[in-house]
Amino acid sequence: MQKMIVSDLDGTLLDHEHKVDAFTAATFQALALQGVHLAIATGRHFLDVQGIRETLGVKAHLITSNGARVHDPENNEIFAENLAPELARALMQPEFSNGSLLNAYVDAGWLVERECPELVGVYYKDSGFGYQVTDLKHHNGEDIAKILYIGDHATLTAIESKIIDRFGDQIYITFSADDCLEVMAPTVSKGHALTAVLARLSIDAEHCYAFGDGQNDIQLLAVAGHPFVMGNASPKLKAAHPNAPVIGSNDEHGVAQQLRQIFKL
């Protein structure tokens, strides 16, 4: 019987410094030796997550940009969905971005409207991923997997309301963290991507174990037969999955500890 483990990264598999700890890496390597299929599901960029997967030391499917991209363990792209260019262009105008730091993900990398070295120092220690400063309000909107606004939660909540009022079901919008609001195509979610990966591997969802901490993990945990909520998870995720077990926090290596219990490592 084939089994799948899928985990979010920030706030879930990574510690508070956004790094992979040795205990977690050893746990995933032991599971890989048992033949368990592994997947990472994150809002991060594919090029970024490649480096984190190398630190884990395992082969794994990569669900990135909240499901807008899916790659197999050999880095072959098996799913891609972009925002409609006209929507992307509109979303990158000051009408929506004012008060936040505007970002966009394209296949070639991470675009940002101004220098933000503080983000690189916090989030990208394991991968070495970096950005390219771009005049996003004049971008043509082509080939954009997601648009990301970074700022204080109150400002982002106002931006979210404005975007929903204008575009409604033309987009999928979610918070990956209190300070990160992300917009993708309406057919995109981690859950949709996980469904595609499970079908590709002929694994029943009942044999899938999923771990998450944020609002963008709601659909991911809904697909898996065995969802687990981190102790440090957002209240909205806990409310969306009231019957899912709440495990240790990311700093307590909650994912690795739970997997060692399940698989008797």
Image (cartoon, grey):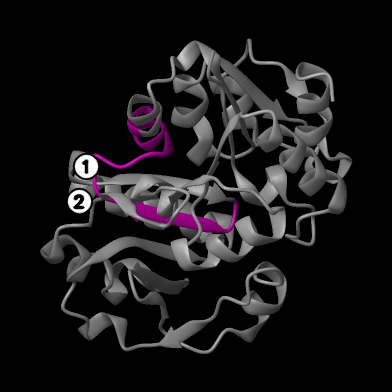
Name which residue lies at 73% across and 51% down.
14
Q: Secondary structure at mark 2?
A: helix
Q: Are marks 1 and 2 in contact (CB under 8 Å)?
A: yes
Q: Amino acid at mark 1?
A: Gly
Q: Amino acid at mark 2?
A: Arg
Name which residue lies at 52% across and 35% down.
217
Q: Is residue 62 left or right of residue 51?
A: left
Would you place residue 183 above or below residue 240 in this image? below
Classify residue 233 by image quadrant.
top right
Q: Quadrant of the C terminus?
A: top right
Would you place residue 107 above or below residue 112 in this image? above
Q: Is residue 220 left or right of residue 98?
A: right
Per the image, is 192 magenta? yes
Q: Which residues are magenta?
A: 178-196
Residue 93 image offset from top left, x and y in percent:
26, 74
Looking at the rendered structure, which numbered label has been put on residue 168? 1
Q: Which residue is mark 2?
A: 166
Would you place residue 171 above or below residue 138 in this image? above
Residue 198 image offset from top left, x and y in percent:
40, 27
Residue 45 image offset from top left, x and y in percent:
46, 63
**In the depicted view, which residue is nearer to us: 185 or 41?**
41
Would you call the spot at circle 2 few (<14 residues within 10 Å), some (14-19), or many (20 or more)?
Answer: few
Q: Is residue 166 left or right of residue 155?
A: left
